[in-house]
Image (cartoon, coloured by chain):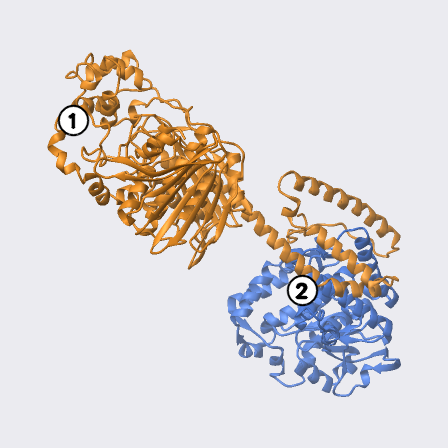
Chain colours: A orange, B blue
Amino acid sequence: MAEDDIITAADGGIAADGGKPVTAKPQPGAVAAPVPATIRSSEHIFEEFREHSVAEFFKKNRQMLGFAGKVKSLTTVVHEAVTNSLDACEEAKILPSIYVKIENVNSHLKVQVEDNGPGIPEHYIGKALGQMLAGTKFHRYVQQRGQQGIGISGCIMFSQITTGKQTHVRSGTGNNKIYECDVSIDLKTNRPQVVSMIELPGTYRGLSVIGEYSEVKNDMSEYSPYEYLKATAMANPHTQITFVNPDGERTVFARASDVIPKKPAPAQPHPLGITTNDLIEQAHHSKERKLSSFLTQNFARVSDAKVDELKALCPGTNFDKMPRELKWDEAEAIVDAFKKIKWIAPSADPLRPIGKQQIEKAMKAVLNPEYMSVTERAPKVYRGGVPFMVEAAICYGGKSGRQSKEGIGLDTKRFANRAPLLFDAGGCAITEAVKTIDWGRYGLKNIDHMPVTLFINLVSVFIPYTGAGKQAVANEDEVIEELRFAIMEIARDLDRYISGKSKDEQREMKRKAILRYVKQIAGDLPYLSGKDLKSSELEKKLINLIENKYTKIFEHGRGGGTAAAAAEADEIAEEAAKQVKKAKKAAASAEKPKKTGKDGGEDDIEE
Amino acid sequence: MKKKDEITDAETKTRLQNLGIHMVAEIDAGVSPSFEAPTRGSGNVTYDEKEKVLVLGDKVEKRIFLNVAQAKKFMQTVAIASKCKKFKEENLHTSIRGLFYQLKFSLGEDIEEDLFEEQEESNDLVEDLEVALDVKREDLNLSTDRKGVVAGPLIIRDKFGGAETTIDCSKQGRSGWMIPSDVDNGMEFIKCDADYVLVIEKDALWQRLNEDQFWRKENCIIITPKGQASRGCRRLIRKLADRGIPIYCFMDCDAWGWYIYWTIKTGSMNLAYLGANIATPEARFIGVTMKDIETYDFLKKLTIRAKEVDIKRAQEMLGYEWISRHKEWVEELKKVLDTKKKIEQDALQGPRLTFVGEYIRAKIKNKDFLP
């Protein structure tokens, strides 16, 4: 497994999105390795405080890191491990197969997450897993699965502080050597502790992480690992996920597609997506010699001309000084100035949607809906410059919808860059957008009692999360509007399907109603016509007529088939009309039939 | 419209059979069985200027089995047609109620539905069949309740139930001869040479004239429909008019009286499909009229306050183009609207019981009618 990726994932979003930093995290005491130079000078003052700070900090800020509530904590563990696996496989261009098993062990839960990824080389195992916020490569500005915690190392620590146990790791890179060891984190120094390392022969390739946890609980709620994995399967059709719950029940979310998603393209951050902290962090790691060239080299759309505009707006700042000498108030002034300048919007090229076809495959595999509609909207920008796009699917029937005590109802599955957003639904722009839809307009007034699943994936290199937990999208006007458009589009499709279906049901009712009378009429006609006919023959013909007329549309399939069938039916009707004319002449009737005048009351003759 | 008394039993049977043949041909051709029938209802009723009767217009409805709104009725109509064919072949008659009981069976073991639930259902369908085949229900061996009584110089031969009877309407005593529902099939006028026919709205007045031997003295036929005239009664009046006998109607001067008169004269909206067959445009209204008050002073004291329904009916009649074209009727109706009064025919017994006869004689002598 590529070390960088693990670490990026582990640093909890400061780098990954280039966006809002986890403001609580870069507290001097908590961050050991890449401490900025300006603060380093006073490091010794806090020496004693730091002894316990990581654990203390961790305990105090569990909620922020996703370890709040027993169910949520368990889901966070699964999420961190699965996200690592998916990113590693993507990087290595491997179709992921992930195995997740949760077991009851005494009063603890044992969680095993195993993948078929590239594995981690022996000497990186400790660093990659057992060190928090280690070796960060800042500001890799790419669209990635949103990270909500502090990665797998956070899980290892969570295991340590709730059970005192080490985490068992097994890694194979496919070169006939498998390494197994136990990993923990020295909370005082934030250094990995790797013990009982053994080397085994074997062709296994992948990573298996087994940890034991307390203060966790498994259930079937919407926040459960099960729902999380189901959602992950929806957004990652190229992934095979096997889940074994504590009762030993096994669920397989089968791989629905063999297409490995394209690796997100790295992109420079756009000035409008930058915070003061981002700017400081990046400036202090820059090898550029001047602040001006640092800006033009590291940010999208920043030209020399724009630097001149910045200079005019920030007269107190020397743009020729070393970037690492940038001070907070100067950085703040520059970020403020960014917002006053007109920028060319950033390129939408780095956006990596799941894709319509892939979503269709995933929905079919996970929900097997009776009907679905998927839309992929064109890229738009919000906050005047951040590109984003919305992908959405509506599924009806099959396993769609959420079962609760009140029965089946709408299930909204929120995603940001393919990562399921399970928590904080209330404050999320996606929830807000769904809420403001006038479902009655789409014949879906009862959506809260219908087997409907809404799948919504927000794609952006900078998802505007509401907070560090990265579980909700902020209410940006442009984002909400685009979300609404996407939902309305697919709601219209579902409306069309359901109204067509209710027509079908009506047809079926009509068919049955008419069939009741066939026997009687077939019994009377031979006598009335005075012809030597068998009632059973007439009955058969009449039933055929009725079946032909009231055949369900959807049995023909939608689209082309229906048109063809209709054309055929017309031909048959025309031919029949000719024959009737002949028959009328033949039946030497004293009464010439009167001219036909169809009246409006015949509700369904023309169907 | 063709006169329906020309239709023979054999012709009716052929029409029933052709209905079935047509449906079987449609089924063989792979289309829904159907039949066409002129639309009934006021929207398709017009006044025929030539015949001077209410007739059905050109609107035709197609009844289709493969139409969920019509399927049951269609099936029921076919069942009725089939039964009627049987009645024709057996030469047996029944009422609509009798037909209803002939057909009120279950549609099948697994179907919780009867062919007919209510008699009302069958009424409508019989009318459908009448218009579709262009026959009267009497031609389908379906009888209606008898209503209406005749006395006078009229002898009829009646073939019924395998027997043949001769009826002399001048020898019916105080009760008179009751008009059957079918006066065509198996009915034949042997002697019919009255000078005129007097149609009297109320049975009480008919009895008055019968007791007075009015019909013998006048050589006329007296008929009372006992209120609204039945189909058989109207048909009989038509047949008598066909013989060139003048028809005079003697009714109350009120809404009901006018309505009975105009139904006899032009036919009704409901039975417009029978058109000229049961209408008698030659009929004349001899009274009672508002104008009579001017002639007969005693009537002034015997008027009754007109009810709302009378006023409404008078207004309605002024709206009917075929009534308002007669200035005499306009005058008469306006008088009712102005004075808000009405007169019952019984009032003519005011001076003395036999005055009724005198009144009628005078009216006919002076040709004092409303058209």
Q: Residue flagged by tag 2: what amino acid is it?
A: Asn
Callout 2 touching callout 1 (CB < 8 Å) = no
Estimate the spatial distance between the alpha carbons at disc 2 and disc 1, rounded to whole Å: 107 Å
Give x and y (percent) for residue A532. Answer: 88, 62
Residue B362 is at least partly visible in this image: yes
Q: In which quarter of the image is residue B3?
A: bottom right
Give x and y (percent) for residue B152. Answer: 79, 80
Which residue position is annotated with label 2? B270
Q: Residue flagged by tag 1: what amino acid is it?
A: Arg
Give x and y (percent) for residue B22. Answer: 82, 56
> In the structure shown, which secondary structural element does the residue marked by tag 2 occupy?
loop
- Above or below, comparing residue B207 to residue A186 in the picture: below
| Residue occupying the point 57% across, 52% down | A502
Q: In this figure, what is the number of numbered marks?
A: 2
Residue B369 is at least partly visible in this image: no
State the mark number for residue A265. Answer: none
- On what subunit does the disc labeled 1 rest? A
Is A434 situated left or right of A529 in this image? Answer: left
Q: In which quarter of the image is residue B67?
A: bottom right
- On what subunit does the disc labeled 2 rest? B
Pick whichever, B112 or B64, lies toward us: B112
Q: Residues within 10 Å of mark 1 (few under 14, many from 20)?
A: few
Q: Quadrant of residue A475?
A: top left
Q: How crowded is mark 2: few (under 14 residues within 10 Å), some or many (20 or more)?
A: some
Is A179 situated left or right of B350 in this image? Answer: left
> In the structure shown, which secondary structural element does the residue marked by tag 1 occupy?
helix
| Residue occupying the point 36% across, 51% down | A109
- Above or below, comparing residue A312 to residue A403 in the picture: above
- Above or below, comparing residue B35 to residue A419 in the picture: below
Mark 2 or 1, closer to the camera: 1
Which residue position is annotated with label 1? A40
